[in-house]
Amino acid sequence: MENVSLYIKINSLPDRLKVEASDFIDFLLMKSKKITKSKKRKAGFLKGTFEMNADFDEPLEDFKEYMK
């Protein structure tokens, strides 16, 4: 949409709706400037929280037939 056509549309509104349109434009501007910060991940954050069994890579009993 061109700025001129937008200006013409806004200019044709009654004063009470111009105020509402202005508030909405302010809301959109605030929404577009809002930046969400993602938390930086730290390597090793979960270290020591769980343990893997030594036989983790071994085939399961149910699948030993297929692994032969």
Image (tube, rainbow, N blue to C red):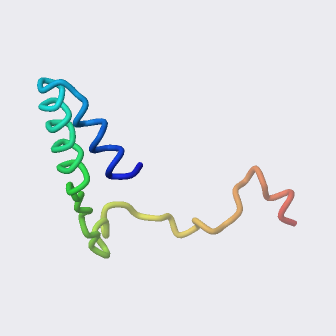
* Position above or below: 56 against 44: above
For the point 31% across and 76% down, the residue is: 43
Percent across and percent down for residue 14 are 18, 24
Q: Residue furthest bottom?
A: 43
Nearer to the camera, 21 or 2: 2
Residue positioned 53% across, 69% down in the render = 54
> For the image shown, how many numbered marks are present on the structure?
0
The quadrant in which residue 24 appears is top left
Can you say whether 67 is above or below 6 in the image? below
Q: Is residue 33 left or right of residue 57?
A: left
- Position of 16 relative to 38 (above/below): above
Q: Nearer the viewer, residue 19 or 56?
A: 19
Q: Residue at 86% across / 58% down in the picture?
A: 66
| Position of residue 30 measured from the top left corner of the image (x, y, whole percent) | 17, 49
Q: Position of residue 5 (x, y in %)?
A: 36, 44
Query: Nearest the camera: 28 or 37?
Result: 28
Q: Point out the image quarter for the C terminus.
A: bottom right
Give me the residue at 50% from left, 64% from top. 53
**In-front residue for pair 23/64:** 23
Compared with 51, 43 (above or below) is: below
Horizontally, is 65 left or right of 1 in the view? right
